Image (spheres, rainbow, N blue to C red):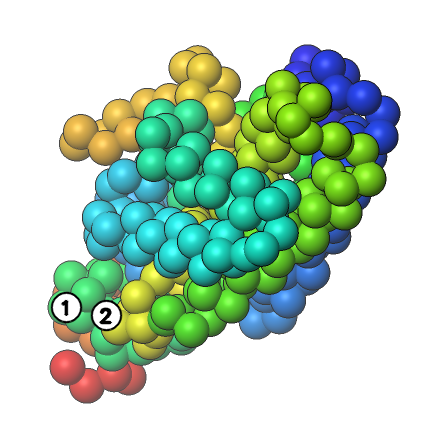
Amino acid sequence: MTDTFENRHDHLPAELRAALEEFSAWSQGQLLVEQNESTPTGPLYHYTNEEALHGILGKQQIWCFRHLHQRDKTEFEYSLEIAREVMRSIGWSDDPFKRSICTGLDDMLEVNSLADAFEFYMFSLSRHRDDRQQWLEYGAKGSWFAIGFAPSLLQPDKDTLSDKASENLHVGRVIYGDEATRARHRLVMEKVADITSRYGKANIAMPRDEELLIQFLDAMEKEVIASQVVWNCLTAKHLQYENEREVRYVIMNVPGKFDDIRKSFRDKDYVETDLPLKESGSIREILVGPLAPPNAEATVATLLKDVGYPEDIPICRSTVVL
């Protein structure tokens, strides 16, 4: 990448760059911990229509749609507002550095739209196999299909942004509800507040170094938002969606990186991502909805044969009662 960690912060003294390096190292480690906890061990299911089934299997591609087009239009703001509540809570501190970093983060989020600063694209899957609610809400009331993807296709293996937007593939298991969301944001904010305080007290004398403090806080705030706040907001939802057991395949970067690969379908932005679906074991099974046409199994079998898939992929009719 042209915008490396070093040249983002080379205007700061080495003693303060060390604070950002400490937080960055913690952040990357924390993201890996979460991704490893999210690593799927069983098939993940994507409920979809026949047109999309043909596209996914035929082109060996999935379409990741922009987060603004998710079913719940408020989910990103839901987690973001909890993050800001945590910032204000920790900001009620006698420690001037902790107070300053929390207030600055809250103010930055107040006046800057993360949706303008970043673009996020997602492909949603469920750990549910043959689930009644999934069929009703995402399978056209049981008349569509569900693809069971092998977990090996969706292993987390990145903890930094690539300069090529379509390579920024991250796997995140969605957490649900205020309590879990608040706890995750608090972990981040307590860490950044502690680091800011330790390095601030050791290296910044007020009011002589007020401009240096402003630069330091600005750099730390941007690092926190880019590396933690965005990710945490992309992988949290209201408790009412808990039954979805969702796992998200996420692509993220700055908007300009998507200019050459962004496409539109029915007024929804998306980007394509290749997956080696024809490799043996990549597709564990295809489920046919309980109310799909009687010849649906034959239709799927013909499709798999025509586009060159292994012959041993199971095609099963759902046993759910709708």
Tell me, yes or no, if residue 100 can be seen here: yes
Q: State the mark number for residue 167.
A: none
Secondary structure under tag 1 reads loop
Q: Is residue 166 left or right of residue 45?
A: right
Rendered position, 212 above or below 247: above
Q: Is residue 20 left or right of residue 104?
A: right
The residue that disc 1 covers is 141
* Furthest-right residue in this view: 14
- The location of residue 179, given as percent across then percent down, is 42, 73
Three-letter residue code for mark 1: Lys
N-terminal of the two: label 1 or label 2? Answer: 2
Please state which of residues 248 and 199 is positioned toward the viewer in this rendering: 199
Q: Residues within 10 Å of mark 2 (few under 14, many from 20)?
A: many
Please state which of residues 12 and 170 is positioned toward the viewer in this rendering: 12
Label 1, label 2: how far apart the Cα atoms are: 5 Å
Residue at the image point whose x is 29% and y is 30% from the top: 269
Rendered position, 38 above or below 268: below
Rendered position, 198 above or below 182: above
Q: Is residue 71 left or right of residue 12?
A: left
Q: Quadrant of residue 203?
A: top right
Residue at the image point whose x is 62% and y is 51% from the top: 95
Residue at the image point whose x is 25% and y is 83% from the top: 320
Three-letter residue code for mark 2: Trp
- The location of residue 7, given as percent across then percent down, is 73, 16
Rendered position, 179 above or below 140: below
Q: Residues within 10 Å of mark 1 (few under 14, many from 20)?
A: some
Q: Is residue 37 left or right of residue 253?
A: right
Tell me, yes or no, if residue 31 can be seen here: no
* Furthest-front residue in this view: 207
The residue that disc 2 covers is 135
- The location of residue 183, given as percent across then percent down, is 51, 68
Please state which of residues 82 and 135 is positioned toward the viewer in this rendering: 82
